[in-house]
Amino acid sequence: MSEVKSKIASRIAKEIEDGDVLNLGIGIPTLVCDYIPDEIEVNIHSENGLIGLDKEAAEGFEHKDIINASGRHATIKNTGSFFDSAMSFIIIRGGHLDMTVLGALQVDQKGNIANWMIPGKLVPGMGGAMDLTVGAKKVICAITHQTKKGDSKIKKECNLPLTAAGEVDLIVTELAVMEVDEKGLILKEIAKGVTLEEVIN
């Protein structure tokens, strides 16, 4: 795991409260599970019909039917449950998730998020992101601050196809934590050793 991804995941874990039911998306969000304190009791939901997911399975202890959003073998708590896709999406669409953590290609000052496709490129599908963004009580965007080419992923306005409009509540990158307000983005935290100019650029 890279230091950048670790920093983002560990910061997001601080947003989780005892008793929360949450969904962790593909990539960095899946790593959040590793940083949830043992004294915090949470139920991690997955669209493929699981609730009670836990950390990744150790080598030799993998089970083919217990997989997290990133497609890696995971473990499940003794209190975990298995169900079909219909029930899984009832949980999402019924407003039963306290939080969802999702990666993104872009996110903007209005809380719009684009995380499912780049025009002209082949994509496997949108997954449950559209349902999760409108169904969860709190939506956290977990992203690296810039693309590999050095372009900021945090925009004034997304120019990629949107997953959802105005649904993101909090953005966490390796440089900063930003809250989405009706007036725009509010800078809540800057990482140690990072300047305001680095965050803005």
Image (cartoon, rainbow, N blue to C red):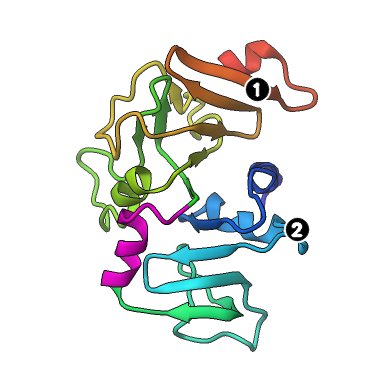
Helix, strand or loop for disc 1: strand
- Based on the picture, tell me whether residue 91 belongs to the magenta stretch: yes
Mark 2: which secondary structure? Answer: loop
Q: As rendered, which of 98 and 118 lies closer to the eye?
A: 98
> In the image, what residue occupies the spot 28% across and 43% down?
117
Name above or below for residue 177 compared with residue 60: above
Q: Which mark is residue 104?
A: none
- The residue stretch that appears in magenta: 86-97
The image quarter in which residue 108 lies: top left
State which quarter of the image contains the C terminus.
top right
Q: Is residue 22 left or right of residue 5?
A: left
Q: Where is residue 99 shown, x and y percent of the image? A: 50, 48
Relative to 93, 120 lies left or right: left
The label shown at residue 37 is 2
Q: Foreground: 79 or 29? A: 79
Mark 1 — residue? 188
Amino acid identity at mark 2: Pro
